[in-house]
Image: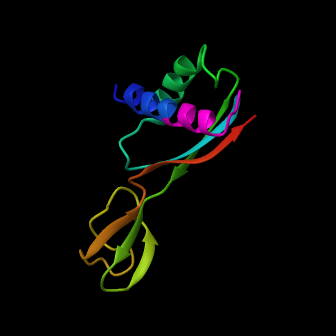
């Protein structure tokens, strides 16, 4: 389960940020997880709950925002949300000249500290 290693890296980052800002407590953590990132949100949440025990984030609330896959079509010159799980064809013109521009990333977007 690679979610544990991802959460471990996240905790390293948030603890560094807390030290940098002289925070004593982390209250809220918000992440965006792309639907194609390979991160299972349920396993991520469980790993988060394990890692926060005894940490500066022991009382923190985790918010996860799922990011849908967005494609850019080279033919239509438009950004379009992918339909179903077809990430190889434009949902509008059905051509294959598309690239994923959103939905395969995971980002820390908000950190509330005290």
Q: Nearer the viewer, residue 94 or 30?
A: 30
In the rendered view of the protein, which quadrant contains the C terminus? top right
Q: Nearer the viewer, residue 69 or 52?
A: 52
Q: Position of residue 52 (x, y in %)?
A: 58, 21
- The residue range painted magenta reads 13-24
Asked if the magenta segment contains residue 23, the reply would be yes
- The residue that appears at 68% across and 28% down in the rendered structure is 60
Q: Is residue 20 above or below residue 77?
A: above
Residue at figure coordinates x 58%, y 39% from the top left: 17
Side of 73 where 16 appears, left or right? right
Q: Magenta-highlighted stretch: main secondary structure?
A: helix
Where does the image place residue 94, in percent across and percent down from the top left?
30, 77
The residue at 60%/33% (across/down) is: 19
Q: Position of residue 29 (x, y in %)?
A: 63, 38
Q: Position of residue 27 (x, y in %)?
A: 72, 32
Is 36 colored magenta in this rendering?
Answer: no
């Amino acid at each position: 389960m690679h979610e544990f290693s991802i959460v471990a890296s996240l905790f390293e980052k948030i603890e560094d940020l807390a030290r940098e800002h002289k925070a004593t407590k982390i209250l809220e953590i918000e992440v965006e997880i792309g639907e194609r990132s390979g991160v299972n949100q349920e396993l991520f949440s469980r790993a988060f709950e394990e890692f926060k025990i005894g940490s500066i984030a022991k009382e923190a609330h985790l918010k996860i925002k799922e990011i849908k896959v967005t494609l850019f079509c080279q033919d239509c010159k438009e950004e379009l949300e992918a339909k179903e799980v077809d990430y190889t064809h434009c949902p509008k013109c059905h051509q294959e000249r598309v690239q994923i521009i959103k939905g395969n990333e995971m980002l820390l977007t908000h950190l509330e500290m005290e």
